[in-house]
Image (cartoon, rainbow, N blue to C red):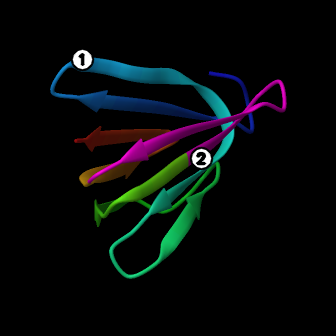
Amino acid sequence: MAQGKITVKIVSPKGEVFSGDVEHVTLPGVVSSFAVYPRHAPLISALEEGDIKCLTTDGEERKFHIMSGFVEVKGDVVTVCVE
């Protein structure tokens, strides 16, 4: 993985939705949305209906609408399990 980037993996019951290195990702947390950047503290959180927004390394924003899910942040890897 490139320095200053995080790897985001989004999976659903149907399979992998997205996998790639991004600048940051914004997630729809149960209390409020939050962003994850490189070197973020470890975290596990529930997610509610909303949009996951990934700013890719080429400056493009990718958006994924979810109904609910969970996220784990471990090192510079963000794993998101969604419906």
Name the amino acid type tagged 1: Gly
Looking at the image, the residue that sits furthest to the left is: 13
Residue under numbered circle 2: 53
Q: Is 26 located above or below residue 66 in the figure?
A: below
Looking at the image, the residue that sits furthest to the right is: 59
Q: Nearer the viewer, residue 39 or 22?
A: 22
Q: Is 30 located above or below residue 13 in the figure?
A: below
Q: Any magenta on residue 27?
A: no
**Mark 1 packing: few (<14 Cα in 10 Å), some, or many (20+)?**
few
Q: Main secondary structure of the magenta part?
A: strand
The residue located at (15%, 27%) in the rendering is: 13
Q: Which residues are magenta?
A: 53-67
The residue located at (22%, 41%) in the rendering is: 83
Residue under numbered circle 1: 15
Q: Is 19 located above or below residue 40 in the figure?
A: above
The residue located at (64%, 53%) in the rendering is: 37
Q: Quadrant of the N terminus?
A: top right
**Mark 2 packing: few (<14 Cα in 10 Å), some, or many (20+)?**
some
Looking at the image, the residue that sits furthest to the bottom is: 31
Residue 20 image offset from top left, x and y in percent: 56, 22
Q: Tell me the CA gap for discs 1 and 2.
A: 19 Å
The residue located at (77%, 27%) in the rendering is: 57
- Left or right of 59: which side holds 3? left
Residue 31 image offset from top left, x and y in percent: 38, 82
Looking at the image, the residue that sits furthest to the top is: 15
User: Which of disc 2 and disc 1 is earlier in sequence?
Assistant: 1
Mark 2 falls on what kind of element?
strand
Name the amino acid type tagged 2: Lys
Mark 1 falls on what kind of element?
strand
